[in-house]
């Protein structure tokens, strides 16, 4: 069957030891999403990833903050540097 | 010859004492249920409406004749083809989710017919099993034949035989409710909670909407089914009364657990059809109002009658009543190709009505629809642009109800994670977490869809997930009913351009 749905594939090969599946919650959205983060990517990159993933339902915002375990995370940190572990929740909120 | 009243009481009560096996061997706790009590505690079990097999067969024959007469008169394909498209898609949802679920009710009743603790209970369960067989066969007959016209109706039979995400959720619910359940929990959960509550919503509330949609065949069918439900629902009440007497905490748990589980599933099955797929001009009552009338009031009366307390999550339920099915519908619209029926964007008239009915959070839902509209305007209408107005990331699902993480509000989603025995779980709401933690041995090893993807059990690429795992095809996967071509949407776009 042709790929006529236009989905962005979640490539199996992309889920590596460096990958971290997370639950992303975008403020304004109606559903939580599975976001596969790279341990070395920055928090600002992870925030962009969630905004892109929820873009169909929520217009991306320029001023956002990422919240993990109740704390606002420095966007310059990496995912591993911020202490993320697999299958945890993070939120993206408008500043 | 004995008259009815002279023999019926004796025929109902045909229990005896066992001489070469113990009562516990005949009715093991694992399958009869707990608390395990000697028959002396069940011997007063009594149904309020008593019937004999002869009466049952005659009544059912008459009811079937009435259903088929209406179907022959106004339920032919040419009649269905005249119905509004959104309503027809509501029929696809109902037809897939319920008839084969009713068949699992047959299995639950047959278990009661063998392992129920009093002979009158077992007799009533036998009738209940026959009822459920009828509730499977009639909608399968009436709805699946529409496959000749619309291939999505194939899912009336196919749905439960797939790993479609909603089938996973519905199967998780009905497998626990009916197939893998002991008789006591089955009859409390099914008869007391589902059938005196939520099937009223689906079979009575929806019947009035079917009338408004001029779908008299469906209206007659579900009204007829509801007359059976009302009769066999009474099985659960004397079961609950006995459990209340001996283990009130357990009785409270069963009622609270199953009310919540029913609520989430029927928010979708009934909520979508009631608030989105019935024409707004024919709608008098919102899903929330149906819930308040048919479920909330009645459920609270039932609790009071049995000396039960209001569930601890009552405030959460009342909050969800305002928004939960709107959250799921908006999300599902953007993942419509993962389902087997088509979706419609609520029109300005719909939204005005929904805002009146759901004022508390409608602004947040409205913002999502405006965003979706923007993308249809940017892409332009037409089936070729479906993919441009479609979600691309994988949604996540609750480890208890198996439904998308759509509880709470767009400002505050209530999903919460849980670490247990070295595993991570996510629950969409506090009540789902509470149920999960009460019986982790029952739920912990079941994987929701995204965990199946991560475990390599399901394809990681969404198109493969849709076609191979959800078993949808280009002919059957869900689409926008209008292909994004809404007169009001174009008019709004021109207004913006001007």
Image (cartoon, coloured by chain):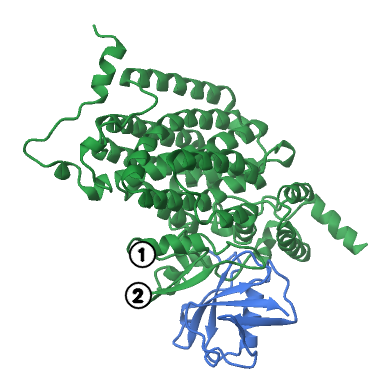
Is disc 2 on the same chain as disc 1?
A: yes
Residue at figure coordinates x 46%, y 22% from the top left: B63
Task: Report the disc number at residue B440.
Answer: 1
Q: How many marks?
A: 2
- The secondary element bearing badge 2 is classed as loop
B458 up-or-down from B34: above or below = below
Horizontal and vertical percent position of residue A21:
50, 79
**Farthest residue toward the right?**
B498
Mark positioned earlier in the residue sequence (1 or 2):
2
Residue B253 visible to the viewer: yes
- The secondary element bearing badge 1 is classed as helix
Horizontal and vertical percent position of residue B267:
56, 50
Question: In which chain is the residue bearing label 2?
Answer: B
**Chain B tint in image:** green
Residue at figure coordinates x 66%, y 76% from the top left: A52
The 10 Å Cα crowd at callout 1, few under 14, some 14 to 19, many 20 or more, is: some
Q: Nearer the viewer, residue B142 or B202?
A: B202
The 10 Å Cα crowd at callout 2, few under 14, some 14 to 19, many 20 or more, is: few
Horizontal and vertical percent position of residue A74:
64, 90
Question: In which chain is the residue bearing label 1?
Answer: B
In the picture, one chain is blue; tell me its letter.
Answer: A
Figure quadrant of residue B191: top left
B467 up-or-down from B93: above or below = below
B272 on left or right of B224 = right
What residue is disc 2 on? B421
Q: Are marks 1 and 2 in contact (CB under 8 Å)?
A: yes
Task: Report the disc number at residue B290.
Answer: none
């Amino acid at each position: 069957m042709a790929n006529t749905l236009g989905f962005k594939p979640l490539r199996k090969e992309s889920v590596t030891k460096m990958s971290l599946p997370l639950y992303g919650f975008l403020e304004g959205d109606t559903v939580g999403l599975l976001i596969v983060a790279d341990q070395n990517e920055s928090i600002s990159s992870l925030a962009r990833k969630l905004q892109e993933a929820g873009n169909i339902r929520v217009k991306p915002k320029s001023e956002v903050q990422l919240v993990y375990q109740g704390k606002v995370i420095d966007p310059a940190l990496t995912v591993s540097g911020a202490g993320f572990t697999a299958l945890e929740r993070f939120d993206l909120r408008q500043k | 010859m004995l008259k009815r009243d002279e023999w019926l009481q004796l025929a109902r009560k045909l229990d005896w004492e066992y001489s070469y096996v113990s009562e516990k061997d005949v009715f093991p706790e694992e399958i009869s249920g707990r608390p395990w009590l000697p028959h002396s505690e069940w011997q007063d079990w009594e149904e309020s409406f008593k019937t004999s097999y002869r009466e049952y067969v005659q009544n059912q024959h008459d009811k079937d004749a009435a259903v088929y007469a209406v179907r022959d008169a106004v339920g032919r394909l040419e009649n269905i083809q005249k119905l509004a498209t959104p309503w027809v898609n509501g029929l696809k949802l109902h037809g897939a989710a319920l008839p084969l679920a009713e068949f699992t009710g047959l299995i639950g009743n047959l278990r009661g017919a063998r392992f129920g603790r009093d002979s009158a209970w077992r007799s009533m369960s036998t009738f209940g099993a026959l009822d459920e067989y009828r509730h499977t066969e009639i909608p399968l007959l009436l709805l699946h034949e529409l496959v000749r016209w619309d291939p999505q109706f194939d899912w009336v039979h196919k749905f439960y035989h797939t790993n479609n995400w909603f089938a996973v959720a519905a199967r998780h619910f009905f497998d626990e409710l009916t197939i893998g359940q002991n008789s006591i929990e089955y009859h409390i959960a099914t008869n007391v909670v589902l059938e005196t509550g939520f099937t009223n919503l689906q079979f009575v509330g929806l019947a009035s909407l079917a009338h408004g949609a001029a779908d008299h065949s469906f209206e007659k069918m579900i009204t007829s089914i509801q007359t059976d439900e009302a009769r066999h629902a009474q099985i659960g009440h004397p079961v609950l009364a006995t459990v209340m007497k001996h283990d009130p905490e357990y009785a409270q748990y069963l009622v609270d657990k199953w009310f919540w589980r029913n609520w989430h599933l029927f928010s979708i099955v009934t909520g979508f059809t009631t608030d989105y797929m019935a024409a707004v001009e024919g709608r008098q009552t919102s899903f929330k109002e149906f819930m308040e009338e048919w479920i909330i009031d009645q459920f609270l009366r039932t609790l009071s009658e049995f000396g039960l307390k209001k569930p601890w999550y009552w405030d959460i339920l009342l909050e969800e009543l305002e928004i939960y099915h709107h959250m799921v519908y908006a999300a599902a619209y953007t993942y419509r190709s993962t389902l087997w029926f088509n979706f419609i964007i609520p029109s300005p008239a719909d939204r005005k009505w929904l805002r009146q009915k759901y004022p508390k959070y409608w602004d947040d839902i409205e913002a999502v629809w405006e965003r979706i509209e923007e993308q249809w305007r940017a892409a332009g209408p037409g089936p070729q642009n479906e993919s441009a107005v479609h979600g691309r990331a994988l949604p996540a699902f609750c480890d208890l109800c198996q439904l998308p993480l759509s509880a709470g509000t767009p400002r505050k989603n209530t999903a919460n994670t849980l670490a247990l025995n070295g595993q991570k779980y996510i629950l969409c709401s506090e009540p789902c977490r509470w149920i999960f933690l009460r019986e982790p041995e029952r739920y912990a090893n079941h994987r929701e869809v995204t965990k199946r993807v991560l475990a390599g059990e399901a394809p990681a690429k969404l198109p493969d997930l849709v076609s191979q795992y959800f078993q949808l095809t280009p002919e059957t996967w869900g689409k926008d009913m209008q292909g994004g071509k809404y007169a009001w949407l174009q008019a709004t776009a021109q207004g913006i351009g001007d």
